[in-house]
Image (spheres, rainbow, N blue to C red):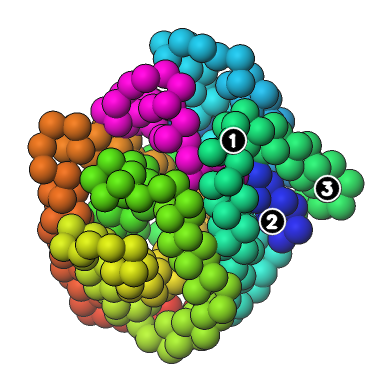
Amino acid sequence: MMLGMFIDQLGGNLIYPFFALYVTARFKVGLTEVGMLLGAMTAGGIIGGLIGGWLTDKIGRKNIILFGLLISGLFSIVIIFINRFELLFAVGLLVGLLGSMSGPAYQAMLVDIIPESNRNSAFGMVRVVFNLTVAIGPLIGGFISDYSYNWLFIGDAVTSAITFLIVLKFLQETKPEEASETVSEDAPTGKRGYLDILKDKDYIFLLGCLMLIFAVMMQMLSTLSVYMRDVHAFPNKYYGYILSLNAIMVVVMQFWVSRRSEKLPPLIAMIIGAVFSTFGYALFGFVEGIWMFAVAMAILTIGEMIIDPMSQTLAAKFSPPDMRGRYMAALHFSLSLSNLFTPYLAGLVIDNYEPKWIWYTCGIVGIIAIFGFLILHYRLKSRGIQAKAVAEV
C-alpha cells in the first residue's frame, strides 16, 4: 500500500504545486479564476467523497481505489488537449467528483490493516511517504515546468498507471465481513448512514475546528506559489525549494513528533500543532527574502506533523467498524468544504487588495480554531473520554 501511494503521489506532486502557475500562464486568467476552478473541483470532491465513503463500506476498498486511479490518469492526459478555460472548468468539476471517491477507501483500508494502538504512527508513516514525494516531485516539477507543463501531466498519467497495476496485483480487499470491534450502544450502526454521523455532536464539532485549521493550511498549495512569484518576484524553483524543505522535515522528524504527540491528550496535541501552523502561515505576511520564507515554512511544518496524523487518528477513534468509510468521508467532506471557497477568496485578495492580508487572515482563523480545540478538549474531559482516547491512541 505504501509503495503504491508513493508512486501515485509522486506523479501528483509533479503537477499540483504548479497547477495555479500552469492555469494562469496557459489560459491567461488571474488567481481569482484559478480559485473558482479549484473551488469547483473541491465542490465535486465533496459529493464524490461522500459517495465514495458509502461505496467503500458497501462494496469494499480496492475497487474504489482502482477507479480513482483510472480517473486521475485519464484527466492528466485529457488536460493537455484542453485550450479553453470554460472547458477546463467543466472537466475539473467532473474529475473532482469522480477522482475523490477513492480518498475514504485509502483511509478505511489503512484503519482495517493497522491495530488501533498503532494508528497515529501509521498515519505518520503515510505523511512520511507523501512528503518523500513532495521532496522529490516539486524539485523535478520546478525544472520541467520551466520547459513544458505538458510533461508534468504525462508523468502523472504514467505514475497513475503503475499504481493501478500495483493495487490490482498486490493489494487484497480488507473490508470487514462483520464488525470485529466492540461498538457502544449509542454508536451509529450504519442503518441511516450519514444522518447518524450528525448525531455524534463531538465529532461534528471536531470537524468544524479542522475545517478552520485546514483552510489555513490549504494556502501552501493554492496561494503561496503565486504570492511568491507576483509579490516577491521569486522564480518558480524557490517555491519548489521551500516545499522540499517542508517534505524533508517531515521525512526526518515525523516519527519523532508522532511519538511525542501520542503522549499528550489528543486535543492538547491538536492545539500545539495549530499554534505552530497558525504562527508559521501568519509570518508570511511579515517577512522578506527566501531565507525568512524558509523559517516560516519550518515553523508551520511542525504544526502539520502534529495535526495531520492526529486528525485521522481521532476520526478513526470515533468511527465504528461498519462505518469507517463514511466517517473518513465525513472527515474528507469537512476538509473539502473548508477548501471550497478559500482559494477563490484568497484570489480576490491577491488580485484586488493588499496580498499580505491573506496571511493576516490565516492568523485570525487559526486562533479561532485553537480556541475550538480547547473547548472540545474540556468538553471531552468532562465526559471522561480524553483519558480513554489517550490510552487507546
Cβ atoms under marks 2 and 1 closer than 8 Å = no
Amino acid type assigned to the residue bearing label 3 in the image: Ile
Few, some or many residues within 10 Å of mark 2 (<14, 14–19, 20+): many
Main secondary-structure element of the magenta-colored stretch = helix
Q: Nearer the viewer, mark 1 or mark 3?
A: 1
Name the residue tied to disc 3: 166
Q: What x and y, as percent, mark residue 201?
A: 28, 56
Q: Is residue 158 magenta?
A: no
Q: CA distance from mark 3 to mark 2?
A: 11 Å
Question: Which numbered mark, 2 or 1, is in the foreground of this view?
Answer: 1
The three-letter code of the residue at mark 1 reads Tyr
* Cα–Cα gap, marks 2 and 1: 25 Å
- The answer to which of marks 3 and 2 sits earlier in the sequence is 2
Please say whether residue 369 is visible from this viewpoint.
Answer: no
Which residue occupies the foreground of this view, 115 or 91?
Answer: 91
The region drawn magenta spans 13-40
Q: Is 1 placed above or below 71 here?
A: below
User: Which of the pair 69/263 is nearer the observer?
Assistant: 69
Residue hosting label 1? 147
Q: Position of residue 133 (x, y in %)?
A: 62, 57
Residue carrying label 2? 6
> Count the marks: how many?
3
